[in-house]
Image (cartoon, helix red, strand yellow):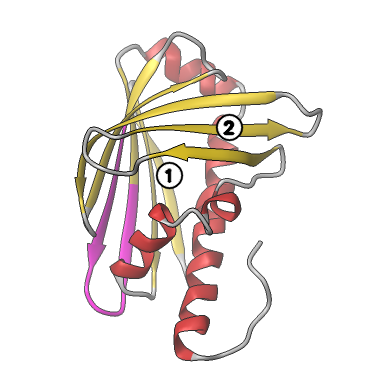
């Protein structure tokens, strides 16, 4: 069973989820293109494409599509990658044009339990407030729930147990 939470300061949002699974599995979900469409799916957005290199100084382009068919492009530059512990990314999204923010993702834990922490850090608190007003934090809570469901699915697959499909 996963435990999750969210905290907010003037210039940051932090999401965390603790799952009963090894951190290597958590890392695989975040870098394996097979899992990304399920990870980024929310009630309002679905992943249309992901291209790029998940590596130190690599760049990626994530395209999400809303229910009306509008595309929302997110540009990612990987500043730091330390498998299976940390990502640090600079992100610019068409959902909040012209404003970049830093994302730090970390995976801590032991062989059977992993804490996945995502911190979004903004230079200007106005950028954070804009995203909050758009309900973006609710979408991110859905993404964290997707992450937990994908972890459960992966644990079943790795143990040879057949289960229901991920979200």
- Left or right of 23? Residue 98 is right
Residue 99 appears left or right of 131? left
Name the foreground residue: 82 vs 112: 82
- Disc 2, SS: strand
At horizontal 67% and vertical 72% (from top left) the residue drawn is 165
Q: Closer to the camera, 112 or 15? A: 112
Residue that lies at the very extreme toward the bottom in this rendered image = 160
Q: Does residue 143 appear left or right of residue 159 in this picture?
A: right
In the rendered image, residue 32 lying in the magenta stretch gets the answer no
Between 88 and 3, the one nearer to me in the picture: 88
How far across and how far down the image is residue 100, in percent? 37, 17
Which dot, 1 or 2, sits closer to the camera? 2
**Mark 1 neighbour density, 10 Å: few (under 14) some (14–19) many (20 or more):** some
Is 109 magenta? The answer is yes
Disc number placed over residue 63 in the picture, else none: 2
- Magenta residues, start to end: 103-117
Measured Cα–Cα span from mark 1 to mark 2: 25 Å
Is disc 1 placed on a helix, strand or loop? strand
Cβ–Cβ under 8 Å for marks 1 and 2: no
First in residue order: circle 1 vs circle 2: 1
Viewer-side residue, 151 vs 74: 74
The residue depicted at 52 percent of the width and 83 percent of the height is 156
> In the rendering, at what x and y percent does residue 136 appear?
57, 31
Q: x%, y% of residue 83?
A: 22, 56
The residue where tag 1 is placed is: 6
The quadrant holding residue 9 is: top left
The answer to whether residue 121 is above or below residue 37 is above
Please report the residue visible at 23 percent of the width from the left and 49 percent of the height from the top. 86
| Main SS class of the magenta portion in the image | strand
The quadrant holding residue 92 is top left
Res. 32 image quadrant: bottom left
Please provide percent x and percent y for residue 147. 50, 58
């Amino acid at each position: 069973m996963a435990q999750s939470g969210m905290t907010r300061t003037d210039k940051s949002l932090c999401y965390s989820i603790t799952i009963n699974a090894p951190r290597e599995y958590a890392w695989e979900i975040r870098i394996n293109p097979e899992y990304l469409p399920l990870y980024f799916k929310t009630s309002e957005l679905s992943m249309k494409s992901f291209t790029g290199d998940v590596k130190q100084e690599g760049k990626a382009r994530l395209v999400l599509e809303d229910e009306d068919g509008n595309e929302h492009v997110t540009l990612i530059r990987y500043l730091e990658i330390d498998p299976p512990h940390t990502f640090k990314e600079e992100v610019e999204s068409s959902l909040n044009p012209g404003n970049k923010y830093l994302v730090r993702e970390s995976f801590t834990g032991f062989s059977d339990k992993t804490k996945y922490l995502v911190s979004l850090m903004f230079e200007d608190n106005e950028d954070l407030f804009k995203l909050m007003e758009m309900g973006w934090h609710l979408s991110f809570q859905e993404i964290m729930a997707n992450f937990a469901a994908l972890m459960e699915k992966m644990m079943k697959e790795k143990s040879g147990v057949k289960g229901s499909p991920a979200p």
